[in-house]
Image (cartoon, rainbow, N blue to C red):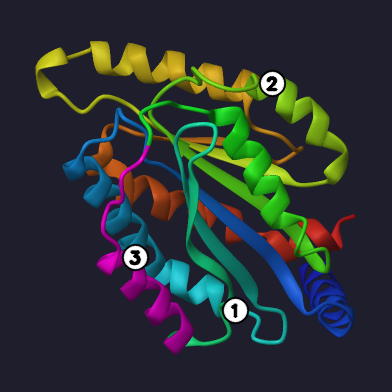
């Protein structure tokens, strides 16, 4: 039985490779609002670079050369303050991935408005993903350390983009002050509930948590592995 399932899986994978050039478009939106200081900004950028360089993430990104992942990264804060850090890039080989990692490592913080326009960031991510209609799956990842306080409500934006077929996942960053003790867990639980209710979208959508920006690399690594795991299988089962 297992052998038959494995054979069927392989045959379906080959069939999928035949008609699609891109298995996933992945847009990463990074929170650079006023609540993110210079140290936290560096931990976020460096954490994403570390996650992309993790052996298991590299392995999954390179798993299907005939149908690579396309990646783009943008920063967001206030309603009119979004900026592309890495434009759409097809992760076709190790050298391309290395170049993305280097860009993240060398990116310096720009002046950004202090507001947190989460709904606008979601809409921005949708617009970027709309430029990749041929990918099997289109995923927006929003990293954030607080609730939206400017612009349209996230839930209203989410409801309007439901028909687009994209998935929205979230990486929620809690406070990292060790002096707050158990308050950290309570605050991150509340923020995670907010992102589940207001932001994430799609049948396989999820919220990943990080206890502070120092935990960002670990959380992002786990999230990328989860997103890239079983992507082909989820497509085969449809």
Answer whether labels 2 and 1 touch (C-beta < 8 Å): no
Q: Is residue 12 above or below residue 150?
A: below
Look at mark 3 in the image and give the residue it sits on.
104
State how far apart marks 1 and 3 are (Cα).
Answer: 23 Å
Residue found at x 37% / y 20% = 188
- Residues rendered magenta in the picture: 95-112
Q: Mark yes or no: residue 229 visible.
A: no
- Crowd band around label 1 with a 10 angstrom C-alpha radius: few (<14), some (14–19), many (20+): few
Residue 165 placement (x, y as % from top left): 83, 46
Look at mark 1 in the image and give the residue it sits on.
63
User: Chief secondary structure of the magenta span?
Assistant: helix
Residue found at x 71% / y 56% = 129
Q: Residue furthest left?
A: 179
Residue 194 placement (x, y as % from top left): 54, 17
2 or 225, which is in the foreground?
225
Magenta stretch: includes residue 97: yes
User: Dot 1: what SS?
Assistant: loop
First in residue order: circle 1 vs circle 3: 1
Residue 203 placement (x, y as % from top left): 76, 37
Residue 228 occupies which quadrant of the picture? bottom right
Look at mark 2 in the image and give the residue it sits on.
155
Answer whether labels 2 and 3 touch (C-beta < 8 Å): no
State how far apart marks 2 and 3 are (Cα).
Answer: 30 Å
Quadrant of the drawing holding the N terminus: bottom right
Q: Is residue 156 above or below residue 218?
A: above
């Amino acid at each position: 039985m297992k052998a038959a399932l494995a054979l069927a899986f392989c045959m379906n994978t080959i069939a999928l490779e035949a008609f699609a050039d891109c298995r996933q478009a992945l847009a990463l939106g990074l929170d650079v609002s006023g609540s993110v200081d210079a140290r936290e900004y560096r931990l976020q950028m460096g954490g994403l670079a570390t996650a992309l360089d993790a052996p298991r993430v590299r392995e999954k990104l390179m798993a299907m050369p005939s149908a690579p992942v396309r990646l783009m990264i943008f920063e967001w804060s206030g309603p009119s303050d979004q900026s592309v850090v890495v434009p759409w890039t097809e992760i076709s080989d190790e050298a391309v991935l290395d170049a993305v990692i280097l860009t993240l490592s060398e990116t310096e913080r720009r002046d950004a408005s202090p507001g947190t326009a989460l709904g606008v960031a979601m809409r921005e991510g949708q617009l970027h993903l709309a430029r990749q209609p041929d990918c099997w799956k289109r995923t927006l990842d929003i990293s954030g350390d607080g609730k939206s306080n400017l612009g349209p409500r996230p839930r209203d934006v989410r409801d309007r983009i439901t028909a687009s077929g994209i998935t929205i996942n979230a990486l929620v960053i809690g406070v990292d002050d060790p002096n707050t003790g158990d308050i950290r867990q309570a605050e991150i639980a509340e923020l995670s509930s907010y992102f589940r209710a207001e932001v994430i979208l799609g049948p396989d959508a999820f919220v990943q948590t990080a206890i502070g920006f120092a935990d960002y690399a670990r959380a992002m690594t786990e999230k990328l592995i989860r997103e890239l795991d079983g992507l082909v299988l989820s497509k085969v089962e449809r």
